Image (tube, rainbow, N blue to C red):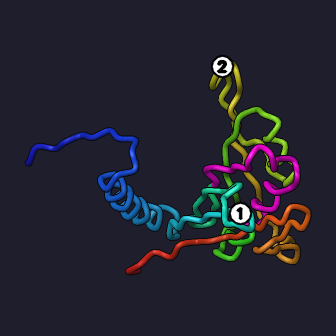
Amino acid sequence: MDELTLTVFDTDDAHRALALRILSEHLNEHHRWATGGECRQLFVTLCDQAGKVCGGIVSCTHGLWLDVEFVWVAELLRRRGHGSQMLAAAEAEARARGCRRVYLDTGASPAAGIFLARGYRACGELADYRDGRTRYWLQKVLEAHERAKQTLHLKAPANKLFVTCSSPRRRGR
């Protein structure tokens, strides 16, 4: 067997991009086998009229699940409903892809209230995760009746921000 090289990296370079593409392909094959569905990325962005990103969600769908990795809103725009709008957009797209449940994890912070207000419920916790804070795993069942309330392109007229939902298609499949 040839000698293998182990590399640890944290930069945005060509090696990282290639490694992520290869890992993604292999993980997608695993998810297709393990969950019966393709693992597809799902991004939601909140942008101002100039196109500057002011918030977003990084997630993926696989099988019946939407797995939310990150939710972020610029500090000056928080507590205005933008996080809820982005979650609604991600959930709507997940439903369109056949998902029936959502999973995410979050720390015990004021921002965690957004998830509870949107119907997420704790399904696990990790005490003393960081500096004595608890980390929670949350899940939500996506109800079929919520479909009537969905809008993927929501406008917040007060400050002219737009929520868009995008889902890059995998090439070659």
Position of residue 148 measured from the top left corner of the image (x, y, whole percent): 87, 77
Tags 1 and 2 touching, CB below 8 Å:
no
Q: Is residue 141 above or below residue 11?
A: below
Picture coordinates of residue 37, whole percent (x, y)? 52, 70
Res. 129 image quadrant: top right
User: Is residue 72 a member of the stretch shown in magenta?
Assistant: yes
Tell me which amino acid carries mark 2.
Asp
Name of the residue lying farthest toward the front: 50
Residue 163 horizontal side relative to residue 171, left or right:
right
Q: Earlier in the sequence, mark 1 or mark 2?
A: 1
The outermost residue toward the bottom is: 172
Q: Position of residue 42 (x, y in %)?
A: 60, 65
Q: Is residue 8 above or below residue 165?
A: above
The x and y percentages for residue 150 are 82, 73
Residue occupying the point 74% across, 63% down: 48
Q: Which residue is mark 1?
A: 47
Residue drawn at x 50%, y 70% as measured from the top left:
38
Label 1 crowd (10 A; few <14 / some 14-19 / many >=20) = some
Q: Quadrant of residue 24?
A: bottom left
Residue range corresponding to the magenta coloring: 68-89
Left or right relative to 100: residue 6: left
Inspect the image, locate mark 1, and give the three-letter code of the amino acid beneath it: Cys
Q: Secondary structure at mark 1?
A: strand
Q: Which residue sits furthest left? A: 1
Q: Please rate how many residues cluster around mark 2, counting C-alpha atoms within 10 Å: few if below 14, some from 14 to 19, many from 20.
A: few
Residue 140 bears which disc, if any?
A: none
Q: Can you tell which mark lies on residue 131? A: 2
User: Along the line of sight, which residue is nearer the eye, 30 or 59?
Assistant: 59
Left or right placement of residue 65 versus residue 39 in this view:
right
Rounded to the nearest angstrom, the CA distance separating label 1 from label 2 is 33 Å
